Image (tube, grey):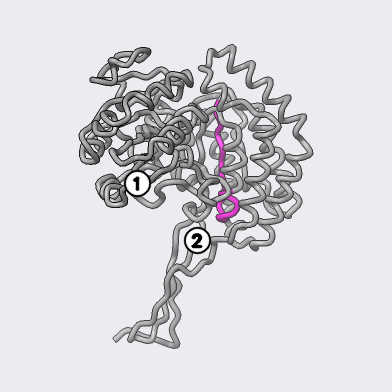
């Protein structure tokens, strides 16, 4: 047994014991723990920011791209956002024990399907230290124990935030092993988590294509997959030009390093004939490198697109762009190049929007809204562990409700089967 395997076995056994207690914990205890964790974080800004400064230097020395450094960076505003997320999750309805459906049978049985915790969740993530709080909070709310393995570059920030989460558990008299952080940068710990059958019930990866691909290849436990955020915006012939300009700019430039950032702009030929290069010029003026195809490539300042620019998650101030023939052309392009994450249509034609929604099977589809809203917090979930792009169990933003399974409660009165 390797050191990493032994470490994960120790954490896993502690997590399984904690999960038994959490499954029976009252909603009040979980709420108390989350509010106490938020209070602890509010009192620890200085320590967390100092830890983050060490991580930022480590990231710069490691040669992280600016978009990755932006994911890693914490400031007062982002820490306040993490606190608010903890308090929001605390105030949400507790999903555990919720009766999803119930019915009676002619045999005399009364049957209920109720939400129940999954058990032990393993979360493997890169760069973003806020996931330490988000994942811990959502796992706790849904009655699950969680083992967190953050990126090597975010170790100190994650440890500082994790300490606040543990303080919350302590004040609510809940087991501290309910939220555990793998205390090493050794990548062997990731492989050990992926092989931890019987200890970890599901793995949730949150990071780039390389990490998710590794998880999918090596995992011996179920995975909630989030591969890439190759998000598209389609500007229909009947789009409002001012809405289109505002939404396209926000979707690309608000934060380029998040999975909900738009990576490809599709413009209906009729819109382009009517309004010209306005959208592309607005992106160029905002500092975006537009990799354009066809007629769009003739716009001064653009760069000729290469074939692999479509289907690319840039996570940077770069965007692919091309003209398409109507909504069906947009649907065909997205089906070929998309990652089933998030797509948006900009149009004032409701029938065209409905066709877009029906023709695509991405986890999130939007109408006249920025793809940057692809976020559990913006969906009212308080926080999210990630955006699941698979089709089994959880899909879209993974919040507390999505971290539950269900069981059947069957009641009779001395009932026997004929």
Q: Which of the pair 368/13 is nearer the observer?
A: 368
Residue nearest the viewer, comparing 46 with 200: 46
Residue at the image point whose x is 69% and y is 59% from the top: 29
* Residue 143 rendering spot, x and y as whole percentages: 57, 55
Q: In this view, does 128 lie to the left or right of 286?
A: right
Horizontal and vertical percent for residue 377? 55, 46
Q: What stretch is highlighted in magenta?
A: 138-151
Secondary structure under the numbered disc 2 in the rendered image: strand
Q: In this view, does 124 lie above or below 107?
A: above
Residue occupying image coordinates x 31% and y 27%: 311
Residue name at image x 51 percent, y 17 percent: 65
- Residue that numbered label 2 is attached to: 116
Q: Where is residue 191 in the image (x, y as percent from the top left)?
A: 45, 31
- Front-lying residue, 104 or 273: 273
* Disc number lying in front (1 or 2): 1
- Asked whether residue 139 is drawn in magenta, I would say yes
Q: What quarter of the picture does the C terminus occupy? A: bottom left
Mark 1: secondary structure:
loop
Question: Residue 152: horizontal and vertical position, in percent?
Answer: 56, 24
Residue 390 falls left or right of residue 295: right
Location of mark 1 (residue) = 348
Residue 198 appears in the figure: no
């Amino acid at each position: 047994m390797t050191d990493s395997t032994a470490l994960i076995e120790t954490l896993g056994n502690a997590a399984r014991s904690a999960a038994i207690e959490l499954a029976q914990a009252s909603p009040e205890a979980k709420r108390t723990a989350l509010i106490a964790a938020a209070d602890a974080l509010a009192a620890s800004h200085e320590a967390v920011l100092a830890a983050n400064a060490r991580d930022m230097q480590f990231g710069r020395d490691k040669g992280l791209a600016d978009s990755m450094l932006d994911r890693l960076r914490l400031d007062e505003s982002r820490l306040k956002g993490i606190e608010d997320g903890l308090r929001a999750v605390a105030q949400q309805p507790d999903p555990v024990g919720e009766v999803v459906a119930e019915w009676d049978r002619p045999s005399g049985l009364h049957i209920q399907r109720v939400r129940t915790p999954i058990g032990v969740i393993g979360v493997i993530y890169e760069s973003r230290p806020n996931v330490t709080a988000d994942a811990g909070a959502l796992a706790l709310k849904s009655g699950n124990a969680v083992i967190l393995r953050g990126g090597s570059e975010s170790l100190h920030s994650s440890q500082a935030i994790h300490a606040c989460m543990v303080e919350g558990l302590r004040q609510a008299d809940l087991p501290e092993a309910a939220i555990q952080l793998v205390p090493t940068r050794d990548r062997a710990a990731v492989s050990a988590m992926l092989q931890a059958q019987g200890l970890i019930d599901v793995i949730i990866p949150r990071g780039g294509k390389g990490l998710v691909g590794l998880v999918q290849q090596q995992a011996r436990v179920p995975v909630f997959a989030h591969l890439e955020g190759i998000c598209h915006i389609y500007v229909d012939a009947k789009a409002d030009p001012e809405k289109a300009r505002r939404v396209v700019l926000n979707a690309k430039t608000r934060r380029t390093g998040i999975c909900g950032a738009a990576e490809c702009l599709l413009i209906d030929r009729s819109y382009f004939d009517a309004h010209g290069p306005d959208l592309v010029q607005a992106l160029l003026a905002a500092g975006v490198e537009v990799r354009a195809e066809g007629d769009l490539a003739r716009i001064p300042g653009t760069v000729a697109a290469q074939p692999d620019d479509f289907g690319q998650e840039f996570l940077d101030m770069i965007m692919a762009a091309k003209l398409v023939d109507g909504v069906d052309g947009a649907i065909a392009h997205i089906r070929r190049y998309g990652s089933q994450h998030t797509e948006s249509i900009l149009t004032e034609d409701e029938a065209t929007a409905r066709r877009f929604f029906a023709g695509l099977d991405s986890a999130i589809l939007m109408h006249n809204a920025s793809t940057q809203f692809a976020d559990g917090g913006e969906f009212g979930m308080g926080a999210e562990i990630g955006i699941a792009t698979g089709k089994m169990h959880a899909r879209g933003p993974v919040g507390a409700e999505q971290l539950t399974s269900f069981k059947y409660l069957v009641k009779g009165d001395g009932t026997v089967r004929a």
